[in-house]
Image: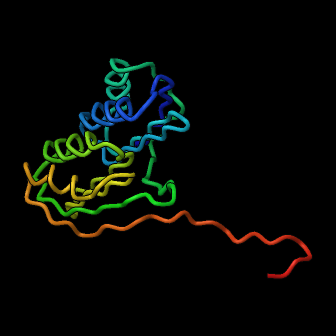
Amino acid sequence: MEAILKLPDLRGDKDRQKAMKTSSGVSGIDYISVNMEDHVLTATGDFDPILLLEQLKKLCSVKIVRINSQGKYQNRGGTAGDTVATVKLDLRDEKDKQKAMKIISCIPGVYLICVTMKDGKLRAKGDFNPIDVVDELKKHFPVKLESVFTAKVRRRATTMAGTRR
C-alpha cells in the first residue's frame, strides 16, 4: 500500500516532525517521507490509509493525491549533502518498529525513515547528525551503526548538439 497525501499547512521543520511522528504511530507503515517543497507525505507498507488520513487530519488539513495498493519503496533522490545513516536494531515486533520510527521522527532534519523488519535495519535520510540517531535509539534498543554517508545528487551529463567535451 502506498499513500501520497498533500499537507498544505506544513510550514516548517516542527510541522514536518509532527506529521512524521503522527504517521509513524499507524501500524504497518514501513516507509515515511515528507517533501517540504511540495508539502507531500508519502507512506508505504501494509497499513490502513483511512486510519493514516484520520490521524493526520487531527494535525492539519489533508488532501489525497493518490492511494495505490501496489506501492513499493522508491528512492526519490535528495539534495547534495544529505546524510544517510543505516542502523541495525533488535526489533521484535510491529510495536518496536513504530517506537523506533517515532524516536527518529523527532530528530530535526530527518525527512525520510525506512524500516525493514526482515533484517532489522532502519535507514534515515536528511540533514542531521547520525550520532543523534544512535544516541536516541540506544535509550530503547541495542543499536549497531552500520553505515553513514553523504548522498550525492545524480545528474545526467547533458551535451548540446554540435559541441564536444
State the residue at coordinates (27%, 58%).
130
Q: Is residue 131 above or below residue 6?
A: below
In what quadrant of the picture does the C terminus appear? bottom right
- The residue most toward the bottom is 165
Q: Residue 143's image quarter?
A: bottom left
Viewer-closest of 149 and 30? 149
In what quadrant of the picture does the N terminus appear? top left
Residue 80 lies left or right of residue 108; in this view the side is: right
Residue 143 lies left or right of residue 11; in this view the side is: left
Can you give x and y, in whole percent of width and height, for residue 77 in the image? 51, 57
Can you give x and y, in whole percent of width and height, for residue 35 in the image? 48, 41
Viewer-closest of 149 and 72? 149
Residue 21 lies left or right of residue 127; in this view the side is: left
Viewer-closest of 70 and 83? 83
State the residue at coordinates (49%, 37%).
36
State the residue at coordinates (27%, 53%).
115
Type of colouring: rainbow
Q: Residue 49's image quarter?
A: top left
State the residue at coordinates (31%, 23%).
55
Can you give x and y, in whole percent of width and height, for residue 87 in the image? 22, 62
